[in-house]
Image (cartoon, rainbow, N blue to C red):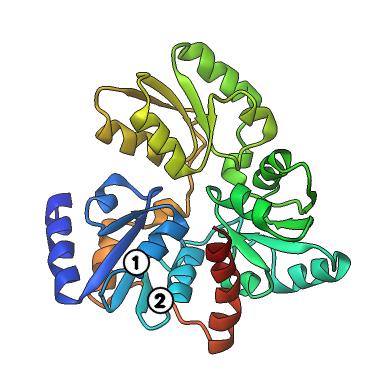
Amino acid sequence: MTTKELQDRIIALKKETDTCILAHTYQSHEILEIADITGDSFALSRQATKTSNRRLLMCGVRFMAETAKLLAPDRTVLLSSPDAGCPMAEQFTREDILALREKYPDHAVVSYINTTAAIKTVSDVCVTSASALNIVKNLPQNKILFIPDCNLGAYVAEAVPEKEFVFVNGGCPVHAAVTKEEVIRAKEKHPNALFLVHPECKKEVQVLADFVGSTTAIMDFARASKEKEFIIGTENSIVTHLQYECPDKFFYPLSAGLICRDMRLTTLPDVLACLEGKGGEEITLDEKTLVDARRCIDEMIRLG
């Protein structure tokens, strides 16, 4: 089948099966084209709760599908590629976080959305890269245990100097691998380009940026800017999406290595097989996990 034939079949089947397709922005462009909702991990799931579809199909990684289930426990939630995990989300176990809670009993456990449902059950509040600053500022506690991304945590800590932070040695291996030298080379190659970067990158990379923000914030900045050239310091799929959206502008990848292999596992045939009942995986969570993990997400919403 051609790409167009696959897409047409998927579009027809999602209507027949009352399925809303969710696609994270790191997915390929042909998958974004057949999705009903696209965006960052939490926004994606939250928007899905506003639909009436009885089934939600996640084109992304496992923790995102778990988040969708937490927010919409009455829906059938499917993960199109069961092997698509997240190295950052899987770096620590629930038991690891419980041990840290014992070590730092007077600290609020602030858990990045890029964590498993099991870790969310022992977290006080969840945050996204876009909301972390605001939520940490609004927390009544002055001592913060930030997990798992230490680069994002350090970015938040610098903006909230009145609070005390403890970090663990975790994070996104793809973003964390970017070096200052790569930024310098990219700037020399494209001297007229603004450099936009994700806070999951190291501080030495962030300080060279013209803008630091979440994936959605990076895309919004590039769309709205009057400038014409941009070096994109996040997953390389964003370069492609922006090229489609803003054909009058030029977008350059910061590094050839900025590729999330787990995100690339999902293909159009995977989505089709899932809709046909021949592939994918239904995400199920026990009642205690649904209640306990949802608590830190509700707290995130409450704190803004």
Q: In the visual, does 22 lie left or right of 66?
A: left
Q: Secondary structure at mark 1?
A: helix
Identify the residue under disc 2. 72
- Where is the N terminus found, in terms of image quarters? bottom left
Q: Position of residue 204 (x, y in %)?
A: 68, 28
Q: Please state which amino acid type lies under the numbered disc 1.
A: Ala
User: In this rendering, does residue 76 appear at all?
Assistant: yes
Within 10 Å of disc 2 (Cα), the crowding (few <14, some 14-19, many 20+) is many
Identify the residue under disc 1. 48
Q: Measured along the vertical axis of the image, is residue 52 above or below residue 85?
A: below
Q: Position of residue 135 (x, y in %)?
A: 61, 55
Q: Which mark is residue 10?
A: none
Q: Measured along the vertical axis of the image, is residue 28 above or below residue 223?
A: below
Q: CA distance from mark 2 to mark 1?
A: 8 Å
User: In this rendering, does residue 59 appear at all?
Assistant: no
Q: Are marks 2 and 1 in contact (CB under 8 Å)?
A: yes
Q: Position of residue 97 (x, y in %)?
A: 75, 68
Residue 294, quarter of the rendered image: bottom right
Residue 88, quarter of the rendered image: bottom right
Q: In the visual, does 160 lie left or right of 301?
A: right
Q: In the visual, does 144 lie left or right of 155?
A: right
Which of the two residues, 200 or 109, is positioned nearer the viewer here? 109
Q: Please state which amino acid type lies under the numbered disc 2.
A: Ala
Q: Residue at x 84, y 65 (%)?
A: 106
Q: Measured along the vertical axis of the image, is residue 14 above or below residue 213?
A: below
